[in-house]
Amino acid sequence: MAVHGLRTYGLGRHQQIDDYQYGGSAGMVLMVEPLSNCIEDLKSKRQYDEIIYLTPDGERLNQSLSNRLSLKNNLLLICGHYKGIDERIREQYITLDISIGDYVLSGGELAAAVLVDTIGRLIPGVLNDETSALFDSFQDDLLAPPVYTRPAVFNNWEVPSILLSGNEAAIQDWQYEQSLKRTRERRPDLLSESEF
Ligand code: ADE
């Protein structure tokens, strides 16, 4: 991963990158020229599969979008600031707009960090146990089941005996049932009719 400061492509003595918006509303907008120069420079060095703009009006990030993006080679993420970026950049370069939720951050950096984290952990070698991302919450539109570790009893609080049984198939059935139960209770919106 590489971070490229827009200021490097700023204009004039002050390396200007933002300006007042046309129309008179309050708030600064990232200018078209520095952003265009930055994107063109990066594109001349690499082929990007997607040029992504982090914005509250984008497609909502979820696990399936992260899964899809984890299969790509090169992604360019554009972080807006202030009131956003000049619309011409969106029209000319952006291939995907992504929002991380229905709230407004002061800039796209935290959203980009969230996106990079969800994608990065799906890339083999990033997690210690390569298979474990497969069992995460949301991976099959179900929340993850409860997990336990040693000791088997603490303060008389017991780990469910099935998990100590050594019966792989029974454990998997139990975990699936627990996932379903948890999803029904906490996120019924994730379930299709047949899973109720
Ligand atoms: N930039 C500002 N708010 C954002 C959000 N909710 N998602 C993505 N980028 C943003």
Image (cartoon, rainbow, N blue to C red):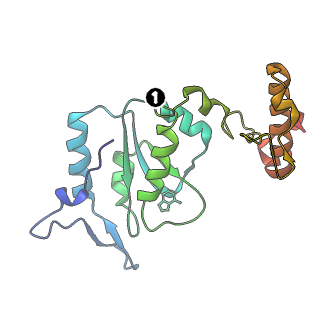
The residue that appears at 25% across and 38% down in the rendered structure is 43
Is residue 144 or residue 76 the one in the foreground?
144
Is residue 152 or residue 109 the one in the foreground?
152
The residue that appears at 66% across and 37% down in the rendered structure is 136
Determine which quarter of the picture holds residue 116: top left
Q: Is residue 149 left or right of residue 72?
A: right
Q: Position of residue 77 (x, y in %)?
A: 38, 47
**Residue 81 appears in the figure:** yes
Q: Amino acid at mark 1?
A: Gly
The residue that appears at 61% across and 44% down in the rendered structure is 62
Residue 55 to residue 188: above or below: below
Is residue 14 or residue 131 the one in the foreground?
131
Residue density around tag 1, few if under 14, some if 14–19, many if 20 or more, within 10 Å: few
* Mark 1 close to ligand 1, CB under 8 Å: no
Label 1: element kind: loop
Determine which quarter of the picture holds residue 14: bottom left
Q: Is residue 153 left or right of residue 78?
A: right
Q: Position of residue 50 (x, y in %)?
A: 40, 37
**Residue 192 appears in the figure:** no
Count up the numbered dots.
1
Q: Is residue 134 left or right of residue 20?
A: right
Is residue 58 or residue 135 the one in the foreground?
135
Classify the position of the N terminus by image quarter: top left
Give the residue at mark 1: 125
Classify the position of the C terminus by image quarter: top right
Residue 165 to residue 119: above or below: above
> Which residue extends farthest left?
13
Q: Is residue 8 left or right of residue 154?
A: left
